[in-house]
Amino acid sequence: MRILIAEDDPVLANGLTRSLRQADYAVDCVGAGDQADHVLLAQSYDLVILDLGLPKLDGFEVLRRLRRRGSKIPVLVLTARDALDDRVKGLDLGADDYLTKPFDLPELEARVRSLIRRGQSGGGSMLTHGALHIDTAGRRATLNGVPLELSARELGVLEVLVHRSGRVVNKEQLAEQLYGWDEEVGANAIEVYVHRLRKKLEPAGVTIRTIRGLGYLLEKPGNAQD
């Protein structure tokens, strides 16, 4: 799950980034509205946490442009403005939730989980690949009805591969879904996650192939090769 934080208070932005990464989200952060608008044009996210008082372009305009482009990304407005008119304006422009500062971190994290579940349920939160079932909202997977013990990063890799079943996915595409811009990715990290997944999936006939020089391919059910 990838989250964009648009917040110009560096202390708050850093605290939110650390907290959400500890909860196994990939988090990117910008400090100005024009940066947020540019990033949202180029990158896909599962949630945006948006401050209204951003420099260069305020949060209202970022939200207006996002919805004008037809994006349905869930948006949590985070602001010191507590006037009713501001809340109504934000919601009318397409915000999904509104939280005023100061706030309790557990409440924000609960709202993040709720908005991501809500966003996923619109497109279906269950992924199925033969005997493999992934509940993307509940962050769990089963194989032949038996719960799979997966780390958050292993589950993230598996979700991407299932979404693109039968197509090659390179390491850069996988890392993009697992890490924020400023997080260092170990040279062999993706290989390790794929290796662990193979050990857990292949006994049930779910096969991840390495396409040398290109990336990984999850065989479609019934097409696995020895």
Image (cartoon, rainbow, N blue to C red):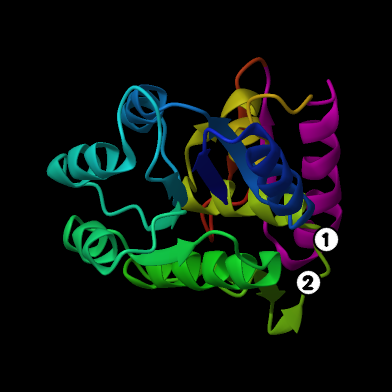
User: Which residue is denoted by mark 1 in the rendering?
Assistant: 200
Work out which residue is located at the far top of the displayed protein and give it. 213
x, y percent for residue 89: 20, 59
In the picture as drawn, the residue positioned furthest to the left comes out as 68
Q: Residue at x 30, y 59 (%)?
A: 95
Horizontal side of residue 34 vs 168, given as left or right: left
Say left or right for 193 vs 61.
right
Q: Give the range drawn in magenta.
A: 185-212
Q: Secondary structure beneath disc 2?
A: loop
Front residue (pair 75, 205): 75
Q: Residue at image x 54%, y 64%?
A: 112
Q: Label 1 neighbourhood size at 10 Å, few (<14), some (14-19), many (20+)? A: some
Residue 203 is one of the magenta-drawn residues: yes
Residue 42 in picture, x, y percent from top left:
36, 25
Observer able to see residue 133: no
Q: Mark 2 points at which residue?
A: 148
Left or right: residue 92 compared with residue 15: left
Determine which quarter of the picture holds residue 136. Answer: bottom right
